[in-house]
Image (cartoon, rainbow, N blue to C red):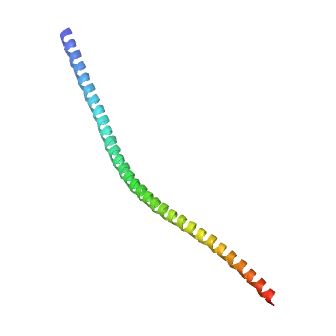
Amino acid sequence: MTNVAIEWFLVTVFILFVLYMIIKTFFYKSIAEKEERNSASMKLTLQEAEILIQKHQLQLQRALGNIDILTQEMNSLKNEVKTLKQRNSQYRIETDKYRSRIKDLEQKIEALL
């Protein structure tokens, strides 16, 4: 009877061990599948992020190019404004000369009258 009880105990322990191992296998398999899905999702997210980064880099390069063009235009306009100011000051000096010349001539005309 003890032999049968020992065999029965060993068979029961073996069956419980096999069931435990099967449950553990399914548990780890489900964890592995979940990790695989997370990994695939992460790869997709990273690819989308790379695409967005490239898109924004292109936009930034275009914007920097536009800034360079605007800077050149602004510098040329500054130069034009400087030349216009110089011309304006020259014209004022000439206008003042002509006014003083006109006053001189008016005084001479009045003196003759």
Task: Identify the residue at image location x=59%, y=71%.
Answer: 87
Viewport quadrant of the N terminus? top left
Horizontally, residue 91 falls left or right of residue 107, namely: left
| Residue that extends furthest to the bottom in the rendered view of this protein | 113
User: Is residue 113 depicted above or below 86 in this figure?
Assistant: below
Horizontally, residue 11 falls left or right of residue 58, namely: left
Horizontally, residue 68 falls left or right of residue 25, namely: right
Whole-percent x, y for residue 51 in the image: 36, 52
Whole-percent x, y for residue 96 in the image: 69, 75
User: Is residue 5 depicted above or below 39 in this figure?
Assistant: above
Depth check, front residue: 83 or 102: 102
Task: Identify the residue at image location x=27%, y=34%.
Answer: 29
Please identify the quarter of the rendering in which residue 104 is found: bottom right
Depth check, front residue: 58 or 83: 83
Task: Identify the residue at image location x=32%, y=41%.
Answer: 39
Asked if residue 4 can be seen in this view, the reply is: yes
Viewport quadrant of the C terminus? bottom right
